[in-house]
Image (tube, rainbow, N blue to C red):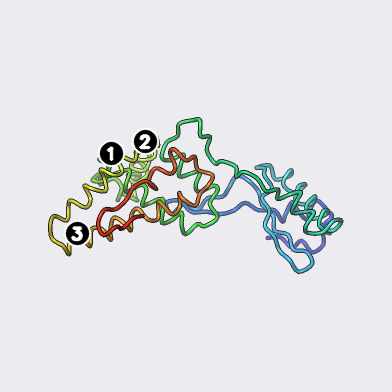
Amino acid sequence: MKNLSHFSKTDIRFWQNAVFRQAYTVDGRHCLTKEWYARMQFRGKREFFSLGTPNKAAAASRARDIYLSLVASGWDATLARFKKPGAPKRALDAGRSYTVGQFLEAVARTTTNQSTLEDYAPAFRQIVSEIFCLSNNNLKYDYQSGGRAEWLSKVHAISLAEVTPAKVQEWKLSFLARAGSDATALRTARISVNAILLPTIQAVASHERIPSMEGRVLCRVRVEGKGDSI
C-alpha cells in the first residue's frame, strides 16, 4: 500500500489509496470482491466498514464521510448512520433460479470466514457431482490442460433447484450403503459422510443471506444411526 502520511484523512486522496477490496479463494484461485471496504481507527477503537459500491471513487468519498462523521459525532452516531441494523441483504434473489456455480459465488462474495468457504465449496461440489454422475470423470484431476476447468463448469452449470433434499438424502444413503453390513466399515462411512456434509450445513445454516428454499436444502438431511444428526 502507498505511503499515505502526506495526505490528511480529510483529503479524498488519502481514502482513494486506503480503500480496498477483500480477497477470497475459490478452487485455489485468488479473487477480489467487487465492493470496496475501509478500516477506521479513531480514539482507540477500530471498525470495518463495507462501502457498498464497486466504484472506487464513490467508495473513497463514502470512507471520508465516515471518518468526518467520527470526528464530528463520535462512534455511536457514526455506527448508527453507516452500520444501520436491519434485515441482512440477500446475496441471491430468492425469486429467481440459480446454478450451483452462482450459489458458490454468492457465498464467496458475502462470507467473512474464508476457511469455512474452502471447506464448504469442495464438499458441496462432491455431493453435487456424485448425485449427477460426474464424480468419476477424470477431467477433475486434470489441472494442466484445462480438464479441471471443464469439469468445474459442468458441476457449476447444474441448477441449484435440482439439488433437492430427496436427492441429497438418496446420495447419503447410497454413500453409507457402500460400507455394507460390517460395523467398523459402517462407522467409518458415517464419519466420512459427516465430514462431507457438515462443512456444507455449517456454512449454509450460518449464512442468512442465502435464500432458505435452495440454500438450506442440506440442513434437512440427517445421518441415520445412533441419533447422529448434522
Identity of the residue drawn at 66% across and 52% down: 37
Q: Which mark is residue 1?
A: none
Q: Is residue 104 left or right of residue 188?
A: right
**Residue found at the very far right of the displayed protein:** 72
Asked if disc 1 and disc 2 are in contact, CB closer than 8 Å, the reply is yes
Q: Quadrant of residue 104?
A: top left
Identity of the residue drawn at 39% across and 34% down: 161
Task: Read off the residue under disc 1.
Answer: 132
Task: Read off the residue under disc 3.
Answer: 186
Dot 1 amino acid type: Phe
SS assignment at label 3: helix
Point out the image quarter for the N terminus.
Answer: bottom right
Q: Is residue 201 left or right of residue 30?
A: left
Identity of the residue drawn at 45% across and 34% down: 98
**Residue found at the very far bottom of the displayed protein:** 44
Dot 3 amino acid type: Leu
Q: Position of residue 77 (x, y in %)?
A: 80, 54
Q: Earlier in the sequence, mark 2 or mark 3?
A: 2
Identity of the residue drawn at 53% across and 47% down: 208
Q: Which mark is residue 158?
A: 2
